[in-house]
Image (cartoon, rainbow, N blue to C red):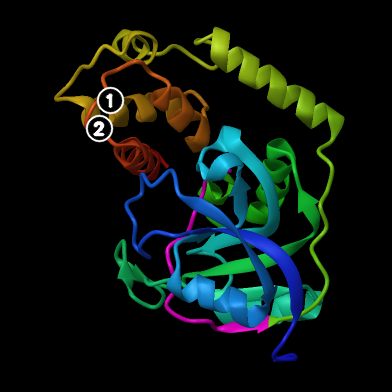
Amino acid sequence: MRSNVCSITRFISVSQGKPFCPADHVEGWTERPVRTCRDFKQDILEKTWSPIIWIDGVRKQENFDLSYFAVLDVDDGHPIDVAHKKLFSLGVSYIIAPTRSHGQPKNGRIADRYRIIMRWQKPIASVDDYKYNMALLITEWGADKACRDAARFFFPSKSIYAWGAGIGIEVRPEPAIEKERREQRISANKYNWNMYGELPGHVEAFLKEGRIFSSGRNSSCFVCAISLKEIGFSEEEAYNKIASSPFPKVDFKDSEIINAVKSAYKRAA
């Protein structure tokens, strides 16, 4: 281990609600200064938190303001001791925090499950830059792709496995060609439903008109996510499509859409 005090002097966005607030918790996030690793570790262990600061404290991707940290969820990547050795050798600022399912049976298997928190070399003020750099880290570490979400938050971890003080990780500019392709895809997804394949009529009707089918809203969201997965949409894109559908959302929480999409992508993988 390194020095027991490291000068982070960065900010994270922390919930002021209960540590285990519901997954649809959108408002009430505040910017909190973190000046030492000790401060940061206590937040990780005690609070619902996020490395992202949102405008007006409203947790939405379109409200992305700043990020000073990258956070990766690792379920099936490097063993935790291997990750620790790699981070130490890189000389970066990091915290490794096991999640509550670490070493416990989950989906029929026991594995190291933990979060890696790393400081960016400089703050990221663009949601596109944030997603691009997170995608690079997710690939490198074999982390959960959902960590790329610019509205992501985290429940408290069970403990701190290791931490170290060092440099920030590099923030890379998105190559112009990749940015152009991404923008073309966003445009195509918005206006051309059949660019990647044919959507079933009932799925298209649900997404465009909010027409519920099957046994209800949950089932409709699940079936739509399966169809979107099959024609090449990412999990995040599928969520955005379904969340923007005009189907009745009174007493239907955003967390129910999230869970339906996650279940569909696990099943369709």
Q: Is residue 260 above or below residue 190?
A: below
Find residue 24 and name its label.
none
Judge from the rendering whether residue 125 lies leftward or rightward of residue 60; answer left or right. right
Element type at mark 2: loop
Q: What residue type is labelled 2?
A: Phe
Q: In which quarter of the image is residue 168?
A: bottom right
Which residue is located at x 35 percent, y 63 percent? 18
Residue 186 x, y percent position in the rendering:
62, 20
Whether residue 126 appears in magenta in the rendering, the answer is no
Q: What stretch is highlighted in magenta?
A: 150-163
> How many badges with numbers are in the image?
2
| In this rendering, position of residue 228 left or right of residue 93 | left
- Name the foreground residue: 170 vs 58: 58
Image quadrant of residue 140? bottom right
- Check residue 249 in the rendering and tell me which mark sits there, or answer none: 1
Question: Quick one: which residue is furthest to the left in this view?
Answer: 215
Amino acid type at circle 1 is: Lys
- Depicted 219 relative to depicted 142: above or below: above
Please, is residue 195 above or below residue 12 in the view? above
Residue 207 coordinates in the image, percent (x, y) = 38, 15
Q: Do the residues labelled 1 and 2 touch (CB within 8 Å)?
A: yes
Q: Which mark is residue 252?
A: 2
Q: How crowded is mark 2: few (under 14 residues within 10 Å), some or many (20 or more)?
A: few
Task: Work out whether residue 195 can be spotted.
Answer: no
Q: Quadrant of the N terminus?
A: bottom right
Expressed as whole percent of the image width and height from the top left, the position of residue 100 reads: 38, 72
Give above or below for 95 relative to 63. below
Left or right: where 223 falls relative to 241: left
Q: Main secondary structure of the magenta part?
A: loop
